[in-house]
Amino acid sequence: MRSTAETLAAPALEVRRLTASYSSRPVLWDVDATFPMGALSAIVGPNGAGKSTLLKAALGLIATDAGQALIQGRPVKTSRDRVAYVPQRDAVDWDFPITVREVVEMGRYAQIGWVRRVQRSDQTLVADCLERVGMAAYASRQIGQLSGGQRQRVFIARALAQQAQVMVMDEPFAGVDARTEADILGLLQELRNEGRAVIVVHHDLGTVRAAFDWVLLLNVRAIAAGPVADVLTPETLRRAYGAAGGLETEEQEPRWAA
Ligand SMILES: Nc1ncnc2c1ncn2[C@@H]1O[C@H](COP(=O)(O)OP(=O)(O)OP(=O)(O)O)[C@@H](O)[C@H]1O
Ligand SMILES: [Mg+2]
C-alpha cells in the first residue's frame, strides 16, 4: 500500500514509452508524458495527431503495442475509479434513453458497485453535483434533449459524483459557445484549485495560453510537454503543425481547429 503522501506526490497521469497502432499503422510512437496533480493540462496537436488515442490507450480502453500508463503512480487497472473520462462528442450515443440524473448516478457506481441500490446519501450527492454545474433544473430531462454545453456540464457532474481525482475530457468545448466555454472553464479551474488534475484535449491555443497550466504538444510523438509558456514556442508549434506553425503571431493566431 502506498501512503497518502506518496499518492499525492505522484503525477496524475504518467505515460511511459507508449506506442499504439490501428491495423499495424502506428498512431502513437514512444510517447512519454506526465500530467501533474493540481493542474489544468491541455493536450494539443493537429487532427489525427493521436490525442484521443492517447487518452484511450492511457486509460486502458484500447490495446497498446508497448509502454505503460500510471494514474497517481499506480497501474490504470487498479485505478479506474480515480479517473473520470469524458470521450469526444461523436463517441457518445445521445439517443440512449437515460436522464440527466441517471447519467450522474452512474458516477456513483464505481463507489457503490453495480448491484447495490443507489442510497439516499448518493442521491443527495448527485443532486449537489447537478446544482454545482447549474443543471439541477434538468435532472429529469433525457440527455438527447440537451445542448452541447449542457451535456458537458452533466458529464462534469458525473465526474464530481464519482469523486475522481483525475478528470480527462476529450474536446469538451467543441460546438460550445464562448460564454458556455468560459463558464465550463471556470468550473474546471475550480476543480483544479481543489487539487484535482484536469486534462483536456483542446484545439484553441489562445485559450490554452490564457487559462491552462500545463500542455502536451502531440503529433504521433510527444513534441514537447511542460508549463504552457515553455512548451508553446514557434519552434515546437512548427514541429507539431508543420510550416503554418511558424506563422503564429500574437495578433494572428492560426486556426487549427476543424
Ligand atoms: N478505430 C480506429 N481505427 C483505425 N484508425 C483509427 C481509429 N481511431 C483513430 N484512428 C486513426 O488514428 C489516428 C489518430 O486518431 P485520433 O482520433 O487519436 O486523433 P486526434 O488527435 O484525436 O484527432 P482529432 O483532433 O480529429 O480528434 C488518425 O489517423 C485516425 O484516422
Ligand atoms: Mg480526437
Image (tube, grey):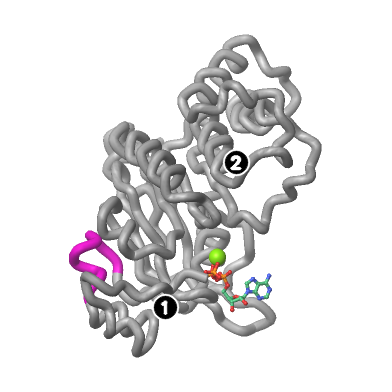
Three-letter amino acid code of the residue under disc 1: Arg
Question: Residue 181, how many percent across, how many down?
Answer: 43, 47
Three-letter amino acid code of the residue under disc 2: Arg
> Which residue in the structure is indicated by mark 2?
151
What element does badge 1 sit on? Answer: strand
Is ligand 1 within 8 Å of the beta carbon of the residue shown at mark 1? Answer: no
Q: Residue at x 73, y 41 (%)?
A: 144
Residue 26 shows in this picture: yes
Magenta stretch: includes residue 230 = yes
Q: Residue at x 27, y 78 (%)?
A: 248
Looking at the rendered structure, which numbered label has been put on residue 18?
none
Q: Residue at x 39, y 36 (%)?
A: 187
Left or right of 5 in this view: 86: right
Is 68 in front, or is 92? 92
Badge 2 density bin: few <14, some 14–19, many ≥20, Cα 10 Å: some
Task: Residue 22: name its quadrant.
Answer: bottom right
Is 123 in front, or is 256? 256
Question: Residue 244, how many percent across, how many down?
Answer: 35, 85
Residue 73 shows in this picture: no
When the figure is inspected, residue 13 is found, relative to residue 46, above or below; the finding is: above
Task: Residue 103: name its quadrant.
Answer: top right
Magenta segment boundaries in residue numbering: 225-233
When the figure is inspected, residue 98 is found, relative to residue 18, above or below; the finding is: above
Q: Which residue is most to the left?
A: 230
Left or right of 226 in this view: 41: right
Looking at the rendered structure, which numbered label has been put on residue 221?
1
